[in-house]
Each structure stands twice: as C-alpha cells, then as structure tokens.
C-alpha cells in the first residue's frame, strides 16, 4: 500500500488473483490535482535515443525522464496513480524485461499498470515508452 500521508490509495481485491505485481485500482484520498504526463521516452539530454536494442536500459532512461517530469510538476513516483508501459515487440520476454525495471523502480508503490506490446514507437531505435498519471493533494 501507499504511505499514510499519500493522496494515492492503491486498491487490491480479494476477488482477483494476488499474483499480479500491482494494485487493480487506485483512487485519491481527497481532493486532488491530477498530473497527466506525456509518454516518457528513452531520450538523453540532446534528444538521442539511448541504448538501441536494450529494453532494460531504455526502460531505466524512461524512468529517469519520468522522474524529472514529475519533479517539474512538484510530484514524485509515490504520487503516480497509473502507468502504461509500451514496448515495441512481439516477444513476451521483452515485455517482462521492461516491466521488471519499472516494477523495481516503483518498489512497494505497485500502481495499476498496463503492459502493452506495440509495433512501433515514435523515435528511431525506441523500444520503450512509459505513460503515467499522478495525483497530488490540494
């Protein structure tokens, strides 16, 4: 679950399997300002795609960029209420490679998430993109 002072409340259901490494739903604990983040891409400061061909390294760069975007909105990873992880692949093991990095970064803040294989992403050599929504108390 989340920290007691967090605006985000993660919800698990006894009616659903407990093997999923994330909460099935999330809500805010009061009035909240939502922050919708653009898809975080594996780009460096110059706009180049990092680590072509390396899904885990690209996921880490996406998380670095996501953390910076959250900070610009006065938010942290603990404020995230939902993520979608997009991976340009048809192989389940590639999805798992990206998910493992994302799950580890969020630690015990296991927000509802969607992991999705796609055919192509926007930048040359891009394999991973992470979308997020955060909720901040008013």
Image (cartoon, rainbow, N blue to C red):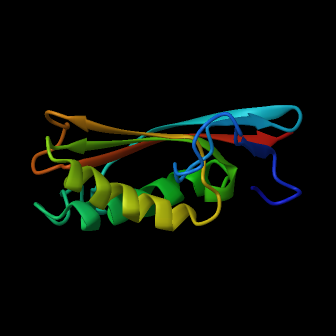
Quarter of the C terminus within the rendering: top right
The residue at 47%/54% (across/down) is 66
Q: Is residue 113 above or below residue 56?
A: above
In the foreground, 15 or 128? 15
- Residue 30 located left or right of residue 22: right
In the foreground, 54 or 25? 25
Q: Quadrant of the rendered structure where residue 106 is?
A: bottom right
The residue at 21%/55% (across/down) is 93
Quarter of the N terminus within the rendering: bottom right
- Residue 2 located left or right of residue 113: right
In the foreground, 96 or 134? 96
Q: Position of residue 130 (x, y in %)?
A: 39, 46
- Residue 12 located left or right of residue 115: right
Q: Position of residue 24 (x, y in %)?
A: 61, 37
- Residue 75 located left or right of residue 70: right
Q: Quadrant of the rendered structure where residue 32 is?
A: top right
The residue at 27%/56% (across/down) is 43
Q: Position of residue 79 (x, y in %)?
A: 69, 50
């Amino acid at each position: 679950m989340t920290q007691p002072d967090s605006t985000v409340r993660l919800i698990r259901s006894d009616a659903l399997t407990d093997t999923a490494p994330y909460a099935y739903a999330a809500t805010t604990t009061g009035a909240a300002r939502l922050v919708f983040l653009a898809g975080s891409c594996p780009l460096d400061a110059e706009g180049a795609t990092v680590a072509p061909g390396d899904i885990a390294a690209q996921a880490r760069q996406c998380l670095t960029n996501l953390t910076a975007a959250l900070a610009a909105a006065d938010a942290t990873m603990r404020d995230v209420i939902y993520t979608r992880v997009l991976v340009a692949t048809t192989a389940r093991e590639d999805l798992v490679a990206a998910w493992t990095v994302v799950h580890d970064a969020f630690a015990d803040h296991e927000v509802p998430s969607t992991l999705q294989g796609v055919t192509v992403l926007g930048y040359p050599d891009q394999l991973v993109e992470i979308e997020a929504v955060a909720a901040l108390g008013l």
